[in-house]
Image (cartoon, rainbow, N blue to C red):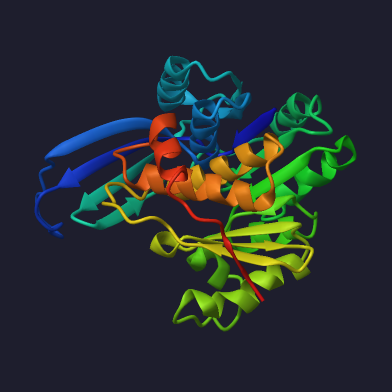
């Protein structure tokens, strides 16, 4: 079982502009889509397509929380929400112009110590052979140690943690030795005082290895159109390029990559085969209007070579 925790679920409002965004003026959309959003939610959508049992956890509040719950209900993915009174889940606006996407993300709900304990009690049923995905931003007002605190509270369970976060939240989670972390290049660079100076993905190698030194068992570094790097605590590094295709929507592709990778691990696949599944899921999603379906992922997977080990 793979449980996904989205501390800050959202209503994602995606709009398409046929002409460039005009500042301090009226802009009209040519296409609109409203979906239940959040990194953990997206991971579960991929896991469902790959027939991996999954349950979505998170905090819901207000009318936007009701919208999120109704959308997830239609997917038939099991959910176990915690209802937070007198607030409202955020709305994230994603503005698509040609190949550019501008995002305006809301702040989200704040949660009490009692509501955090509610979540922990729900997650205590997981143990050996299970995975818990902690993905996205922490609740509004929560400390950067929030994910690390959750991992420490559940540390004796034997569960494997996957963390998709950034900044100090990621840094502190690394100290709890998660099974895998999945930053992108921007998130990786933000961890270093020098800004992670990189001209090519080769320049990311020493920085990615730092994630292992700081505690991760595995680090899956998404490189966009360049594919991904996988670092392991055995000192091995693999690279796999992304397949060619028309990118229609890169939003959610990193979440899909993590979902594909974890699906492979849950099925007992090798790390390299899990990397292939991650690239297939992430790329198929980028080539789709939204989260890819099983056939799209399988079609790409058949075309992918074996990852290249870097010495």
Judge by depth and name the residue closer to the eye, 137 or 19. 19
Q: In the image, residue 232 lies at what x, y percent?
A: 72, 61
Judge by depth and name the residue closer to the eye, 221 or 10. 221
Q: In the image, residue 225 lies at what x, y percent?
A: 39, 61
Residue at 45 percent across and 36 percent down: it is: 298
Residue at 68 percent across and 34 percent down: it is: 267
Q: In the image, residue 224 lies at what x, y percent?
A: 42, 60
Examine the rendering and report whether any part of residue 146 can be seen. no
Q: In the image, residue 134 lies at what x, y percent?
A: 64, 43
Residue 231 shown left or right of residue 126 in the figure: left
Residue at 45 percent across and 19 percent down: it is: 75
Image vertical order of residue 304 relative to residue 80, above or below:
below
Judge by depth and name the residue closer to the eye, 163 or 115. 163
Image vertical order of residue 303 relative to residue 115, above or below:
below
Residue 250 shown left or right of residue 232 in the figure: left
Examine the rendering and report whether any part of residue 290 can be seen. yes
Residue 244 shown left or right of residue 79 in the figure: left
Residue at 58 percent across and 30 percent down: it is: 59
């Amino acid at each position: 079982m793979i449980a996904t925790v989205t501390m800050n679920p959202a209503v994602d409002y995606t709009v398409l502009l046929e002409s460039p965004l005009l500042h301090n003026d009226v802009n009209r959309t040519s296409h609109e889509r409203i979906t239940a959003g959040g990194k953990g939610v997206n991971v579960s959508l991929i896991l469902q397509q790959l027939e991996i049992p999954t349950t979505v956890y998170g905090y819901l509040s207000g009318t936007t929380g009701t919208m999120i719950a109704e959308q997830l209900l239609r997917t038939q993915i099991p959910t176990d929400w915690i209802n937070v009174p007198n607030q409202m889940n955020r709305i994230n606006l994603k503005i698509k112009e040609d190949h550019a996407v501008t995002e305006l993300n809301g702040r989200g709900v704040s949660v009490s110590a009692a509501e955090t304990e509610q979540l922990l009690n729900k997650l205590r049923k997981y143990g050996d052979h299970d995975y818990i995905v902690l993905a996205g931003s922490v609740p509004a007002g929560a400390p950067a140690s929030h994910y690390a605190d959750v991992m420490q509270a559940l540390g004796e369970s034997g569960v494997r943690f996957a963390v998709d976060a950034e900044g100090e939240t990621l840094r502190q989670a690394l100290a709890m030795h998660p099974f895998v972390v999945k930053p992108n290049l921007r998130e990786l660079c933000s961890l270093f005082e020098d800004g992670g100076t990189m001209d090519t993905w080769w320049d990311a190698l020493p920085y990615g290895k730092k994630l292992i030194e700081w505690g991760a068992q595995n680090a899956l570094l998404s490189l966009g159109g360049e594919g991904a790097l996988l670092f392991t605590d055995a000192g091995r590094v693999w690279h796999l390029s992304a397949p060619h295709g028309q990118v229609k929507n890169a939003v959610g592709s990193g979440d899909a990559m993590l979902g594909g990778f974890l699906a492979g691990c849950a099925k007992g696949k090798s790390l390299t085969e899990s990397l292939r599944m991650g690239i297939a899921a992430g790329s198929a999603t980028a080539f789709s209007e939204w989260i890819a379906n099983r056939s799209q992922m399988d079609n790409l997977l058949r075309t992918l070579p074996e990852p290249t080990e870097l010495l």
